[in-house]
Amino acid sequence: MYKEKRAFAENIEVRSKKGESVKAGGYAAKFNVLSEDLGGFRERIMPGAFDDVLDDDVVVLFNHDQNLILGRTSAGTARINQDGTGLFYEFDMPNSPLGQNLTESLERGDVKQSSFAFSMRAGEERWIEDANGAIIREIVKISRMFDVSPVVTPAYPDATVAKRSLEEMQAAKVEKNDEAIRACQDLANAKLRILDLREHD
């Protein structure tokens, strides 16, 4: 399984009450929303895709940087949840220079988008063509969630794994078409042989 990253342009909310720690979060992904072009295809996450990863030990990082930890589900300082809209995450902002700086950046709107890192197994995606011939990858199940990250600049087109899967699908489709063509040719040749035998009888 390879790690993939996807970004989602949804504002991150900052919430705090007097005497309580600052909390921040938002949707890391929304269901049935088509992505931008990822290099010859678009993508959408299907409802229920996160069913099997809600108990994963997921960390919240800033810009996917392992050195900039904001929270962790196993520590109770971060939470992920799935509803009818998509995958929602929330974390308790650490009382540290990183947390203070990020809180100000979120409140100012300098940081406002999220990204998440995940992996899938074979067979947990579908490739389809819409009515206009556009290729769409549907993510049916996610096998592992690694992190959710507030990000400065979303790097959504980090889709090399998906592109490899697309190429394999297209190669299989070509091979299948070639097999069908060969089968038709074999059938035509068999009919010609039968006709030839009849002519010699």
Image (tube, rainbow, N blue to C red):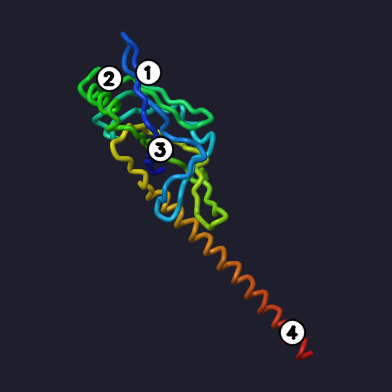
The answer to whether residue 91 is left or right of residue 44 is: left
* Callout 4–callout 2 Cβ contact below 8 Å: no
Q: Residues within 10 Å of mark 4 (few under 14, many from 20)?
A: few
Report the residue that reaches farthest toward the bottom. Answer: 200
Q: Residues within 10 Å of mark 1 (few under 14, many from 20)?
A: few
- Tag on residue 195? 4
Q: Earlier in the sequence, mark 2 or mark 1?
A: 1
Relative to 124, residue 89 above or below: above
For label 2, the SS is loop
Q: Residue 20, percent across and down?
A: 33, 11
Please give the name of the residue rendered at 33% of the width and 43% of the height, measured from the top-left corner: 155
In which quadrant of the rendered image does the N terminus lie? top left
Q: Which residue is mark 3?
A: 118
At mark 3, the secondary structure is strand
**Which residue is label 2 attached to?**
94
The amino acid sitting under disc 3 is Phe
Q: Residue furthest front?
A: 108
Instruction: Tell which circle, 2 or 3, labels the residue nearer the N-terminal end.
Output: 2
The residue furthest right is: 201
Cβ–Cβ under 8 Å for marks 4 and 1? no
Q: Using residue 191 as the reference point, say whether residue 131 is left or right of it.
A: left
Residue 76, label in figure: 1
Taking depth in this image into account, of 88 and 67 the one nearest to the observer is: 88
Q: Residues within 10 Å of mark 2 (few under 14, many from 20)?
A: some
Q: What's the residue type where badge 4 is placed? A: Leu
Of callouts 4 and 3, the N-terminal one: 3
Disc 2 versus disc 3: distance between alpha carbons? Answer: 24 Å
Q: Quadrant of the C terminus?
A: bottom right
x%, y% of residue 175?
Answer: 53, 64
Residue at figure coordinates x 42%, y 31% from the top left: 27
Tag count: 4
